Amino acid sequence: MSERKKISQPVTIYDVAREAGVSDATVSRVFNNKNNVRAETRERVLKVAEKLGYVANLQARMLAGGKSNIIGLLVPGLDTAYMAAIIRGIDLELSVAGYELLLYTTRRRSANEASYLQYIANSVSYGLLLVVPLLSQKYLEVLSDLTYPYVLIDEVDETNTSFSVDSTNWQGAYDATQYLIKLGHRKIAFITGIPLHTSNNRLEAYKAALEESGILIRKEYIASGDFSQSSGYQQTLKLMALSDPPTAIFAANDVMAIGVMDAVRELGMDIPADVSVVGFDDIPQASTTHPKLTTVRQPLEQMGREGVRLLLEQLEYPDRPPRRLTLATELVIRDSCKSIK
Amino acid sequence: MSERKKISQPVTIYDVAREAGVSDATVSRVFNNKNNVRAETRERVLKVAEKLGYVANLQARMLAGGKSNIIGLLVPGLDTAYMAAIIRGIDLELSVAGYELLLYTTRRRSANEASYLQYIANSVSYGLLLVVPLLSQKYLEVLSDLTYPYVLIDEVDETNTSFSVDSTNWQGAYDATQYLIKLGHRKIAFITGIPLHTSNNRLEAYKAALEESGILIRKEYIASGDFSQSSGYQQTLKLMALSDPPTAIFAANDVMAIGVMDAVRELGMDIPADVSVVGFDDIPQASTTHPKLTTVRQPLEQMGREGVRLLLEQLEYPDRPPRRLTLATELVIRDSCKSIK
DNA sequence: TTGAAAGCGCTAACAA
DNA sequence: TTGTTAGCGCTTTCAA
């Protein structure tokens, strides 16, 4: 043990007890808000603790009481505004409940999902939140074998055996497409994301909206993107090179929509005069583009919050059956779309 | 305690000891890689542990004086590409060393820095990385009182009493300004960030470069931004409204530079034909703007990595005196600047 | 309302 | 090389 450490952790529950003239158990009671402590005693203890700068040692507390206040979060990385928004929600809700967040990245041991999850489950965290867009079936299997509390965020377990939070991807995309149709557009292109559950739903809704309005679904108007800005850019170049180019482009996320805008501008065309653009997510950047992007807002922050709630619920009531929570999306109309006469 | 828990963590060191016919201390030795264990015994213990599915209880280990493999990271939030890049570096280096990352946000208890740090120090993490741009002096004081290992990332402790990693802000800004001067610009504006150490250094370098080339420093060319895109946008509008507007704008970070580009475009001017733009940081977005942004690259990811190294070094050699590591910036020339005839 | 005592699972002297 | 013995700082019975 280093010198450093010794110096830095002097004040224990015993110091407080001695100074306040009570037993350590009493101090413990005070700090656990037990009600069998005389108000006067409690006050004295608190005062002494304050004076001494006492802070509970979490390790000891956990060891003795069995509870950790740490929950894990598994993500591929933190590089997207999408992830940042979800994590903000998680952090907010967690801090309300007095929990800490341990961050795990899939990048770290993608080699062996099974043992990585085992490791996590046996480590300090008492539950796990997963925001893993490319969640492998493998993960899911291991997870349910583990009898370890977890919640899937923005991902769905088709077998309905996991707690999960997502949003109305279908409805959101349907609303957006309908909006474009109402503006008079009939040549509406769609740029897909990676073929995930969420992305597929958006594509389906796009098709459904068109069909419902009697608009032919044209294969050449469905472009394959991968959620990246450059894919939005590239696919737009292709779309606009069509002999009969679309008058509106709906991208499966905002990042691609920004790429779309870049491409359109580069082609010397105007948004929204020449081309209307719609995104999905409503990341912060969406409101700082020029023109401001019309998009489908996913309640990312709230999804994070609800994910935490579901997890804490499991911690408290381990026997409740899995639930799936679906939050509403909302069409945010800004300046990137225009009606066609 | 939940049923779940009982099921999932029964196996202790004692179980292994009993089953392997040794004492608990021996099992402990095996798992701490002490060399005073007979190879044969070690193997037996390991086999039993494997069979029983033993996993060390971190809390207990830490309490007993052992080391945790968790280090903390204190940040204001995860909302910027800047932060994401640093954290990527941290995560990478940490995973190499087999450490986990516990995330703390200043948002959570900004009310009382002192006790929050106390709390962190007494919690499970064994050291702390800080990426806190608006680090208050208060934090620093508490930190050094704590004798708890920590490293400041992209921030400097003027008293030279902390381990820290930063980059050559001054040199980077100097290089960028020189570059613009070499291109023939003499009317160069600078948009500052929040008045932090880093930002101030960039401003000083800008001034020094101008002075050195005999260019008058014009107060009206120094605009006060706050690192946000909208401040870059707003300040540019002001700058361009000047009776003698600048021909080049150097923003103290990339996010503002993007705002600058928006504003210039909105004024119907071209980049780089009418106005040259330079940023600072080289966030991923910088290479996806149109035109691509010329900027000063800060080795953010590497700063994260080096921060981890410094922290681990402290953990291993607690008596080494504080060091400050300054990494080199690099001017990344892309398409947002043009020479003036 | 309080204190004494036991123990959470582990590490680290000290013996053997 | 191994076991024995003390704790680490806390919570929680059980008595008083």
Image (cartoon, coloured by chain):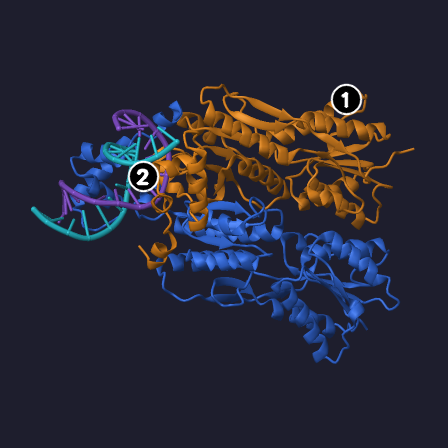
Chain colours: A orange, B blue, C cyan, D purple
| Label 1 SS | helix
Q: What numbered label is drawn on residue A282?
A: none
**Residue A93 quadrant:** top right
Picture coordinates of residue A40, whole percent (x, y)? 44, 37
Relative side of A12 to A194, left or right = left
Rendered residue at 49%/40% (across/down): A100
Dot 2 surroundings within 10 Å: few (below 14), some, or many (20 or more)? Answer: some
From the image, which quarter does the C terminus of chain A lie in?
A: top right
Q: Is residue B313 above or below residue A270?
A: below
Can I make out residue A129 in this image? Answer: yes
The residue singled out by tag 2 in the image is: B56
**Residue B278 quadrant:** bottom right
| Label 2 SS | loop
In the picture as drawn, the residue positioned furthest to the front comes out as A40
- Residue type at tag 2: Ala
Picture coordinates of residue B225, whole percent (x, y)? 73, 59
| Chain where mark 2 sits | B
Can I make out residue B91 in this image? Answer: no
Relative side of A197 to B2, left or right = right
Q: What numbered label is drawn on residue A211?
A: 1
- Residue type at tag 1: Glu
Dot 1 surroundings within 10 Å: few (below 14), some, or many (20 or more)? Answer: few
Q: Is residue B285 above or below residue B164?
A: above
Q: Is residue B135 above or below residue A17?
A: below
Rendered residue at 86%/62% (across/down): B241
| Chain where mark 1 sits | A
**Residue A297 quadrant:** top right
Picture coordinates of residue B292, whole percent (x, y)? 71, 57
Q: Answer whether labels 1 and 2 touch (C-beta < 8 Å).
A: no
Picture coordinates of residue A156, whole percent (x, y)? 56, 26
Rendered residue at 79%/50% (across/down): A266
In the picture as drawn, the residue positioned furthest to the right comes out as A341
